[in-house]
C-alpha cells in the first residue's frame, strides 16, 4: 500500500489529538482511503507536558527545519498557532514543495494573501478546515459542496468562549465576570481571553469565511469588531423579556453591491435557529441562491473535534498526492456582485438601547428629542424600576437607523447631566 509521510509541527492539544486519531484508526483509514498515512517526524520543544498519547521519542525533533527539509515528507501540518514562526514554517514548507495543513486562523487572516499566492505559485495547497468551527466541515462545504452557489449572507457564532459566557449569563443568571471565571475553570477560556471575548478571534474567522463566500480577502482593519465585555446581565434579561437572545455574531452581508463585515453582540429572535446555540457550540448560518439557507452546527472547540478536521485535510491531500493531482482549491473567484466594502458608519440596523438616567421628569422627553433630531424613530420604550437610589434604566427598541446617526445621537445623550453611565447599544438582526 502506498504511503504518505507526514511531518507535524506542534504537539499540543490538537497536535496530540491528530496523532491519536491517525494511530488508533490507522487500519480503518487505510481501508477507507487506500493509503497508509505515516507520521515521520514531530517537532515540539515541550517534551515534559502530559499528552493524551505516548509517542516514540525517536520521532521527535526540536528543529522544524528537519521536517521542512526532509525530502521524504509529503505534508507539513502546522499546529503551533501564532504568527511567527508559523508563517516562516509554512512559507518554507511550500518553497520546499510540500503541501500544508494548518488550523491557524489568525495567521491566514493576516497573511493569507501572501501564503495563498505562494502556494498557487508552487502548485501546492494550504488546507485549513480546523481554522473555523473546529470539526464543523464549513470550509470544505463552502469550497466544494456549495461551489455553484452565490451567497448573500453569513451569520456565525464562531467563538466557543464568548458563547459559553453569554449562555451562563442567560441560563444561570451569572454576571459577566462570574461566567468568564467559570469558563476559565472548565478550560473553555484562555488565561488571557481577550482575543475571544473582544471579538478578534471571531473576526479572523469571518475573514476566511468571507474569502470563501465572496472572493474578497480583507484585512482586520476592514471589519468592525466589538466584544461582549460591556454586555451586562441586565441586558441579557431585558433581551429575554423582549423575545431575544444575545449572541456574539460574525456577520458578512451583501446588499446593493456592497459587502459589510462586522463582529458584535447581537439581539436575535428566540425563534431563530442561532438563538438556541448554547455553550461552547458554534453555528454558521449561510444564505445561498441555489441551496437556500443552511445551518452548520457543532462543537466549536475540543481536542478531537479540531483534530478530526485536520485529519480530513490530511486525507484530502493524500488522495491528491497519490493521484499526482494539483487541485487549485485556493483559486477563489471574486463575487462580481460586490463592488466595494461598506463603511461601518453606513450600515443600517434596528437597535436595543439602555440608558441609566436620573429619575426626574422630562428625562425621557430629552432623550427622545435628541434621537428625533438625528432622524431616529423609537419602536418601543420601557422605564424600569429603580436599580439604585434615584437612577432608573430606560430601555428602547428603535426602528432601523444608520449607524453614524445613532452614534451621533448617543454622543449627545451621554453628555447630558441626567445620564449617569455610558449608554449601551446592541444591534438587532433577524438573520
Image: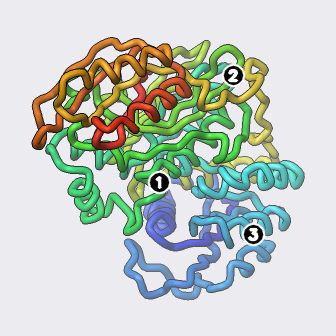
Residue 306 badge: 1
Q: Where in the figure is residue 60, as x and y percent of width and height? A: 58, 83
The local crowd at label 2, few if under 14, some if 14 to 19, many if 20 or more residues have their Cα within 10 Å, is some
Question: CA–CA distance between discs 3 and 2?
Answer: 35 Å
At mark 1, the secondary structure is helix
Q: Residue furthest right?
A: 121
Q: Quarter of the image containing the C terminus?
A: top left
Q: Which residue is mark 3?
A: 88
Mark with earlier residue (2, 1): 2
Mark with earlier residue (3, 1): 3
At mark 2, the secondary structure is strand
Q: Quarter of the image containing the N terminus?
A: bottom right
Q: Name the quadrant containing residue 180.
A: bottom left
At mark 3, the secondary structure is helix
Q: Which residue is mark 2?
A: 258
The local crowd at label 1, few if under 14, some if 14 to 19, many if 20 or more residues have their Cα within 10 Å, is many
Amino acid at each position: 500500500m502506498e504511503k504518505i509521510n507526514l511531518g507535524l509541527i506542534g504537539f499540543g492539544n490538537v497536535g496530540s489529538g491528530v496523532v491519536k486519531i491517525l494511530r488508533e484508526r490507522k487500519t480503518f483509514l487505510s481501508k477507507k482511503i487506500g493509503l497508509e498515512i505515516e507520521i515521520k517526524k514531530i517537532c515540539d520543544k515541550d517534551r515534559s507536558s502530559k499528552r493524551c498519547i505516548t509517542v516514540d521519542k525517536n520521532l521527535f525533533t526540536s528543529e522544524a527545519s528537519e521536517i521542512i527539509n526532509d525530502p521524504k515528507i509529503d505534508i507539513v501540518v502546522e499546529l503551533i498557532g501564532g504568527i511567527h514562526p508559523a508563517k516562516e514554517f509554512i512559507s518554507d514548507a511550500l518553497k520546499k514543495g510540500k503541501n500544508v495543513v494548518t488550523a491557524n486562523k489568525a495567521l491566514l487572516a493576516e497573511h493569507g494573501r501572501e501564503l495563498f499566492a505562494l502556494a498557487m505559485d508552487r502548485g501546492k495547497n494550504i488546507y485549513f478546515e480546523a481554522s473555523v468551527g473546529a470539526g464543523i466541515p464549513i470550509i470544505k462545504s463552502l469550497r466544494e459542496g456549495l461551489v455553484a452557489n452565490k451567497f448573500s449572507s453569513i451569520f456565525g457564532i464562531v467563538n466557543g468562549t464568548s458563547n459559553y459566557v453569554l449562555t451562563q449569563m442567560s441560563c444561570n443568571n451569572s454576571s459577566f465576570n462570574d461566567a468568564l471565571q467559570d469558563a476559565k475553570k472548565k478550560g473553555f477560556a484562555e488565561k488571557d481571553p481577550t482575543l475571544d471575548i473582544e471579538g478578534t478571534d471571531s473576526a479572523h474567522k469571518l475573514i476566511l469565511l468571507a474569502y470563501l463566500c465572496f472572493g474578497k480577502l480583507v484585512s482586520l482593519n476592514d471589519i468592525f469588531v466589538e466584544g461582549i465585555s460591556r454586555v451586562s446581565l441586565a441586558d441579557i434579561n431585558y433581551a429575554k423579556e423582549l423575545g431575544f437572545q444575545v449572541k456574539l455574531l460574525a456577520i458578512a452581508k451583501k446588499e446593493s453591491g456592497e459587502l459589510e463585515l462586522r463582529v458584535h453582540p447581537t439581539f436575535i429572535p428566540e425563534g431563530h435557529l442561532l438563538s438556541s446555540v448554547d455553550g461552547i457550540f458554534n453555528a454558521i448560518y449561510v444564505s445561498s441562491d441555489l441551496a437556500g439557507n443552511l445551518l452548520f452546527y457543532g462543537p466549536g472547540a475540543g481536542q478531537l473535534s479540531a483534530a478530526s478536521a485536520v485529519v480530513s485535510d490530511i486525507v484530502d491531500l493524500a488522495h491528491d498526492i497519490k493521484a499526482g493531482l494539483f487541485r487549485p482549491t485556493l483559486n477563489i473567484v471574486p463575487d462580481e456582485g460586490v463592488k466595494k466594502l461598506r463603511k461601518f458608519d453606513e450600515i443600517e440596523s434596528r437597535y436595543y438601547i439602555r440608558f441609566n438616567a436620573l429619575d426626574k421628569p422630562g428625562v425621557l422627553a430629552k432623550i427622545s428629542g435628541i434621537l428625533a433630531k438625528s432622524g431616529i424613530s423609537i419602536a418601543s420604550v420601557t422605564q424600569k424600576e429603580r436599580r439604585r437610589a434615584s437612577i432608573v434604566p430606560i430601555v428602547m427598541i428603535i426602528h432601523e437607523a444608520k449607524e453614524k446617526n445613532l452614534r451621533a445621537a448617543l454622543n449627545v445623550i451621554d453628555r447630558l447631566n441626567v445620564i449617569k453611565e455610558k449608554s449601551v447599544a446592541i444591534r438587532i438582526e433577524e438573520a
